């Protein structure tokens, strides 16, 4: 798994997104990602 600055920012805003994406393997929708 590659860690990029976007992953860090994403985690800082909402850790649940990264939890669902990496732990539960649920695909994340980019629409929701950019509506911070």
Image (cartoon, grey):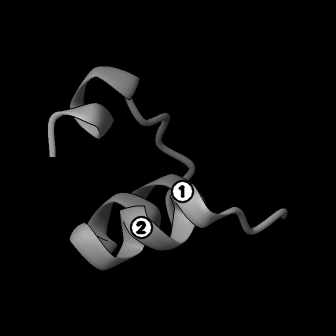
Give the residue drawn at x 15%, y 46%.
36
- Is residue 3 shown left or right of residue 6? right
**Looking at the image, which residue sits at the far front?**
5
Judging from the image, what secondary structure is the residue with disc 1 in? helix
Q: In this view, does 26 lie to the left or right of 4?
A: left
Which quadrant of the view contains residue 5? bottom right
Q: Which mark is residue 6?
A: 1
- Label 2 – label 1 distance at C-alpha: 5 Å
Question: Looking at this rendering, what residue extends furthest in the right direction?
Answer: 1
| Residue 23 point in image, percent of width and height | 55, 67
Vertical side of 27 occupied by 24: above or below: below
Judge whether 4 appears above or below 21 on screen: below
Residue 19 percent coordinates (x, y): 42, 69
Give the structural element (helix, strand or loop) at label 2: helix
Question: Which one is nearer the viewer's eye here, 6 or 17?
Answer: 6
C-beta proximity under 8 Å, tags 2 and 1: yes
Give the vertical position of 27 relative to 8 (above or below).
above
Q: Which residue appears at 39% of the width and 26% of the height?
A: 30
Q: Residue at x 28, y 21 (%)?
A: 31
Q: Nearer the viewer, residue 35 or 20?
A: 35
User: Where residue 9 is drawn, which disc sits there?
Assistant: 2
Label 1 neighbour load within 10 Å: few <14, some 14-19, many 20+ = few
Q: In which quarter of the image is residue 32?
A: top left
Residue extending farthest to the top is 31
Residue 35 locus on image (x, y percent)? 16, 34
Question: In which quadrant of the rendered image does the N terminus lie?
Answer: bottom right
Few, some or many C-alpha atoms within 10 Å of disc 2 (few <14, some 14-19, many ≥20)?
A: few
């Amino acid at each position: 798994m590659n860690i990029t600055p976007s992953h860090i920012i994403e985690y800082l805003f909402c850790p649940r997104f990264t939890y669902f994406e990496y732990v539960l393997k649920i695909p994340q929708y980019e629409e929701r990602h950019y509506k911070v």
